[in-house]
Amino acid sequence: MISRRHIRLRVMLSLYTYFSHPQNEMTSSEKQMIKHFTSISELQIIIISFLFELHKYAKGFLEGNKSKFIPTDEDLNPNTKFINNRIFSILLKDEIITKKLSKVSVIWRKGDLDIIRKVFVQVIKSNHYKDYLDSNKDSLTEDKKFIQLLLNEFILDNDIFHHILQERSIYWLDDLPFIALFLKGQINNLKEEKSASIIVDVFKNNEDKKFAVDLFRKTIYNASEFNSLIESKVKNWEMERIANMDLILIKMALTEVISFKEIPVKVSFNEYIEISKYYSTQNSKIFINGILDKIVSQFKREGKIQKIGRGLI
């Protein structure tokens, strides 16, 4: 499910934690990293559970309106298009989801944040909701569009939603954009005769999991050697003045260059320079590119880079 870039990001964060605490053991840090990877599936379930809690609240709201002292015609005969949205009935056929929903849904009902009610009020007051109910179109496609709209406009950018996620895992806000994009894609692919679960394994295959573990281990194994190499290239800079994240990104890139024969050098360069734009300083991409270029040029002269296939160096 997750891409190689997302794997790199997760390994980067784990390495940052590892190198920030000298007392850390590599084995326990690696186990913690894998645990964080597997928690991504839980994040999918939690997002889906929010949708179901919103759906449940909507049902109760419409039923409650019928019990008003002087109900209107609209109260007695409400538009049930949202509570009859086909996505909910399709997802309820997913055994993996139904088994896990009850275990995580409670997080939206704990405390005094009242997030479900607050989001529901925002939804029913919105033009999006009114347009959906008033539309003459009644199809699975329309239902999908509205659920994706709910995610985009009312849930995924909600500050309280972010706060609750962060209480459960400090990494989930970093994971959220990718997981949200993946989940919306899964919803878009749903069919009414659905059989397969939309909750899939975190890693696409064993090679991706091996890539994560090897990248983590080999970066640590080579850290001292890479420190010396970086120090020899920074000239007037002192190692202590280099941002820790920059050092980690350089070490990870160098690890890929010399230890992963199937990954082109250019790909490794581009990936870590791109990551640095979001996770390090403003000038990091220029600095990282410069240091990598110098060290990799040295590796090439020394014959240390062995790649499988043409054009990978």
Image (cartoon, grey):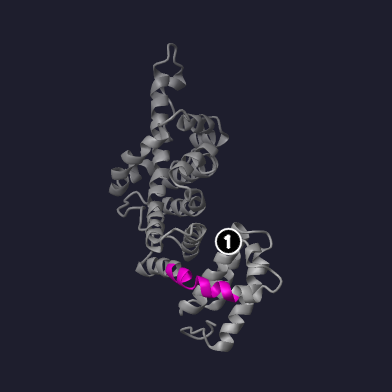
Per the image, label 1 sits on a secondary structure element best described as: helix
247, 261: nearer the viewer: 247
Q: Amino acid at mark 1?
A: Met
Q: Quadrant of the N terminus?
A: bottom left
Q: Quadrant of residue 86?
A: top left
- Extent of the magenta region: 217-229
Q: Tell whether 287 sits left or right of 206.
A: right
Rendered position, 56 above or below 141: above
Q: Position of residue 231 (x, y in %)?
A: 62, 73
17, 100: nearer the viewer: 17
Q: Is residue 220 magenta?
A: yes
Q: Tell whether 186 sits left or right of 125.
A: left
60, 47: nearer the viewer: 47
Residue behind mark 1 = 245
Q: Quadrant of the C terminus?
A: bottom right
Q: Main secondary structure of the magenta part?
A: helix
